[in-house]
Image (spheres, helix red, strand yellow):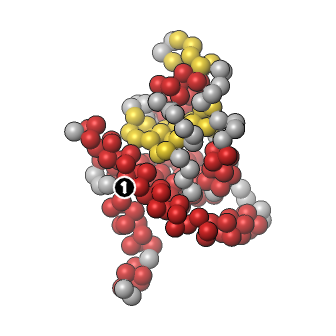
């Protein structure tokens, strides 16, 4: 039953992401340019990326969910996600408040400690069956896996995911239902006009 739920969640993430990327691809570019110029005047929020072993220990201690992001140096979509998604002020705010952000270069030979043994970051990526980049896994504070989000996610979609996971809403409602509820809260008049 749990496997079916996880598979459904992964499938839901992929479907939602594909539809959002198609609908928003043209609208994103001007918005990002505008946000970039206005954010230079504001105080910028920062957050810390942790190594895999350090992040898991910190999350367990602080009882925070883990956002585990796999990337490579050559991946264009990874760089775009760094710039636009992880560069978004709201995303950084939610990550600071509710998550321990862990970043792993899936092709690195750099070593981390896991259960008293040293393994490479490449081996960590293999443990999560990472085959393409970027991919973002969400974990409980204990390190137990919840579900992955494969591919690029813009800031708007990523905020929905972060808010859905941080309050354990994935246990109660599907991602699609959560997004619909949030959109109704944000645009109550839109539904009335239809």
Q: From the viewer's perspective, is residue 63 above or below residue 158?
A: above
Quarter of the figure with residue 65: top left
At 28% from the left edge and 52% from the top edge, which residue is drawn?
A: 172
Quarter of the figure with residue 73: top right
Instruction: Please say whether residue 170 is visible from this viewpoint.
Output: yes
At 61% from the left edge and 70% from the top edge, which residue is drawn?
A: 27
Compare residues 86 and 97 and report the one nearer the observer. 86
Q: Secondary structure at mark 1?
A: helix
Q: Which image quadrant: the C terminus? A: bottom left
The single residue placed furthest to the left in the displayed view is 1
Expressed as whole percent of the image width and height from the top left, the position of residue 84 reads: 65, 55
Position of 46 with respect to 148 (left or right) is right
Expressed as whole percent of the image width and height from the top left, the position of residue 120 reads: 59, 19
Bin the neighbour count of mark 1 within 10 Å (Cα to Cα): few under 14, some 14-19, many 20 and up: many
Residue occupied by mark 1: 175
At 53% from the left edge and 28% from the top edge, which residue is drawn?
A: 125
Position of 134 with respect to 59 (left or right) is right
Position of 104 with respect to 63 (left or right) is right
Expressed as whole percent of the image width and height from the top left, the position of residue 178 reads: 36, 60
């Amino acid at each position: 039953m749990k496997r079916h739920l996880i598979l459904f969640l992964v499938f839901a993430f992929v479907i939602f992401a594909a539809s959002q990327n198609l609908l928003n691809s043209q609208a994103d570019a001007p918005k990002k340019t505008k946000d970039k110029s206005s954010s230079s005047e504001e105080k910028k929020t920062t957050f810390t990326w942790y190594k895999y072993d350090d992040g898991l220990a910190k999350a367990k201690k602080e009882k925070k969910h883990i956002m585990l992001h796999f990337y490579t140096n050559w991946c264009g979509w990874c760089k775009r996600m760094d710039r636009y998604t992880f560069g978004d002020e709201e995303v950084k705010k939610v990550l600071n408040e509710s998550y321990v952000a862990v970043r792993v270069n899936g092709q690195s030979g750099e070593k981390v400690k896991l259960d008293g043994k040293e393994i490479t970051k490449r081996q960590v990526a293999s443990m999560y069956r990472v085959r393409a980049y970027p991919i973002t896994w969400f974990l409980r504070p204990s390190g137990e896996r919840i579900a992955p989000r494969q591919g690029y996610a813009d800031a708007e979609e990523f905020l929905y995911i972060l808010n859905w996971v941080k309050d354990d809403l994935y246990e109660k409602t599907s991602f699609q239902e959560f997004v619909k509820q949030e959109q109704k809260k944000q645009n109550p008049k839109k539904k009335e006009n239809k």
